[in-house]
Image (cartoon, rainbow, N blue to C red):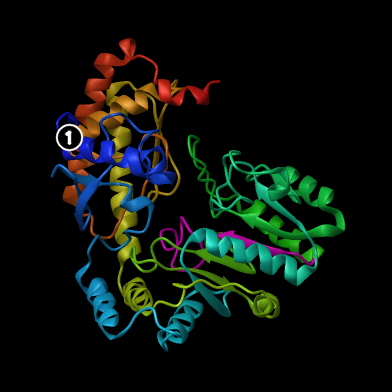
Amino acid sequence: MTRANSQDRDLRERAAAVIPGGMYGHQSTRLLPDDYPQFFSRAKGARLWDADGNEMLDFMCAYGPNLMGYADDAIDAAYIDRMRQGDTMTGPTGLIVELAERFTAMVTHADWAIFCKNGGDATQMALMIARAHTGRKTVILAKGAYHGAAPWCATRPVGVIREDKAHQLFCDYNDIASLEAAVAAAGDDLAAIFAAPMKHDAFTDQALPDPAYARRARELCDAAGALLLVDDVRAGLRIARDCSWSVVGVQPDLSSWGKCFANGHPISALLGSNTAKRAAAQIFTTGSFWYQAAPMAAALTTLDRVRNTDYLEHIEGLGTRLRDGLAERAAASGLGLRQTGPVTMPLFLFDDDPDLRKGFFWSSEMLRRGVYVHPWHNMFLCAAMTTADIDQALDAAEASLKALKGQVGSLGPVAKMSFLTA
């Protein structure tokens, strides 16, 4: 798939003049293979079309928001109908109450909800509420975990000062001794433990939560009078219809949600128990677009689908078919391919590939065959996918593994990923 003389190339040149870096954040393709498209024109179901009209089966699902399928007719109809009646107004509609009732009825630990726009909004509120509830400052986070792009949790140091990250301690995910040591270091100043639903750090194998680790986090918060947050922005509704830690029998005080509970329409949420309700009512938090009615209508329709269909079992079945088929093809090729994380959110990394040269080559080969995968970030399945889609991906994977096998000894380094081995 060439970018020469293309709409994508022309848009990149124009963007470089008016957008810092040409593109920013996780939507930038600067850390992807050079042939990956930066711009897209449309999407439907499980498929994307780039600015040049190339169609691809999409295993990124917009980095998570696509749960039921792009441009889902019923969900979008609810959104459009509400837009025609009024969306951003001087005050919210009754949909905010209905959505809070529906969501809290679905999530076991939740007694209340606050709606916002981005996952980072929700985790920022959780931080404020934990400090308001406890009167303390220190929070514990897992090393490498992602909780948003605000200065307090930003993963890159540029533009961030030391004070932005004050009163933070770190532990290793799934390491009880490390977690206990961090709590001991916090002493009587522990406000909260922030927990990812699983270890889903970029560039590294994913790991599901150890039930003993999750239980110990709950126990330590209870003993200290601190709050436990599960940041479910990325994994929510792809592991369970409840908070993701419900599968290991642990209920947090707070959980942050986003990406997919309105199937890509702009809304996120912080859910909480009555333990933290008084503190949640005391903080000041708001946004001009947090009360939009149309995304709430889309969310209600999406949550109806979550409650009344087998969407989760469907994508789990597809994910298992993909994982088993890919393992069989990788074994036949003689290439070491690691598949980690839940089958609904797979990550693929090659053995002996410290600078991702194998991963970049294979991903580009997949793209040439009409399948969009990511060489170092977890991916997502959506309910619009079919067994035929998975079989298409497996056929592409087999051919791409064969191409990689023929080139593996001559692959040059990926210069843009040199920081991984620096």
- What residue do we see at 34% from left, 66% from top? 265
Instruction: Between residue 278 and residue 104, name the one nearer to us.
Output: 278
Magenta region, main secondary structure:
loop
Residue 410, placed above or below residue 7: above
Q: Residue furthest right?
A: 188
Residue with the most extreme front position: 17
**What residue is shown at x 37% (from left), y 80% (from top)?**
293
Q: Is residue 229 magenta?
A: yes
Residue 368 x %, y %: 19, 32
Which of the 4 image quarters holds residue 351? top left
Tally of marks: 1
Q: Is residue 365 left or right of residue 340?
A: left
Residue in the foreground of this view, choosing between 106 and 321: 106
Q: Secondary structure at mark 1?
A: loop
Magenta-drawn segment: 225-244
What residue is drawn where x is 38% and y is 54%? 64
- Which residue is label 1 attached to? 369
Q: Position of residue 8 (x, y in %)?
A: 21, 39
Residue 170 is left or right of residue 102, and the answer is right
Q: Amino acid at mark 1?
A: Arg
Q: Is residue 248 magenta?
A: no
Query: Residue furthest toward the top?
Result: 410
In x, y percent, where is residue 28? 38, 41
